[in-house]
Image: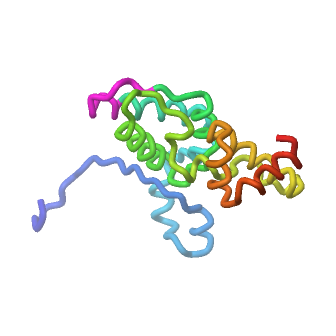
Amino acid sequence: MVGSPKPATVDVRVIAATNKNLPAMVSKGLFREDLFFRLDVIAINLPPLRERGDDILLLAGYFAKRFAEEYDKPPIRFSDSAIRVLQRHQWVGNVRELQNVVHRLVVMNEDGDIDVADLPELMRFSIQGSTGVDKTLAEVEARYIRRVLESVQGNKTRAAKVLSIDRKTLREKINRYSL
């Protein structure tokens, strides 16, 4: 009761989430120690989505089913190559980013089949996984060109456009790297 002179007893549980390192912030004086210890009864450390490969597939399937039902669309089927791209993506926005991507895929899809070409361009053509610091530039370039060619089903004109090079340069690189 707001404004009442009598104290009121309440039973509450606070669930809080952060992407900050609170113990480090407490030690630097950037977060109140007493508040930290009130909140830190049970800590659940959840790694980012990119580190939980199988969760990506489970969540993508869940969101696909939910949005397909919501929009009266056919059931969604992800190709094996699309699944690999989803698993390699960094998911900086975590579950919300995955939800938005699947939402867009369902809304824009007509037949229920999702392949690499249906994925957002950033996901299709970015190098994921290894940072490449243990590889030569030629190895990284060859791998990237191979992935782009796979994503456009070998269409050299489209691959050259994605790579921002002309077809002749692409042909030379294909021959150089024996792709």
* x and y, in percent, of residue 161 in the image: 63, 55
Q: Which range of residues does the magenta coloring cover?
A: 66-76
Residue at x 70%, y 58% (from the top left corner): 166
- How many discs appear? 0
* x and y, in percent, of residue 176 in the image: 89, 49
* x and y, in percent, of residue 45 in the image: 57, 46
* x and y, in percent, of residue 80 in the image: 61, 28
Residue at x 55%, y 36% (from the top left corner): 56
Q: Quadrant of residue 53?
A: top right
Residue at x 57%, y 35% (from the top left corner): 82
Identify the image quadrant of the N terminus. bottom left
Identify the image quadrant of the C terminus. top right
Task: Give yes or no for residue 99 being in the magenta stretch.
Answer: no
Seen as rendered, the residue at the extreme front is 168
Depth order, front residue of 40/22: 22
Q: How is the image coloured?
A: rainbow
Seen as rendered, the residue at the extreme bottom is 29
Depth order, front residue of 81/151: 151
57 displayed left or right of 132: left
Depth order, front residue of 120/58: 120
163 displayed left or right of 96: right
Residue at x 77%, y 49% (from the top left corner): 130
Is 151 situated above or below 14?
Answer: above
Task: Give yes or no for residue 73 being in the magenta stretch.
Answer: yes
43 displayed left or right of 141: left
26 displayed left or right of 102: right
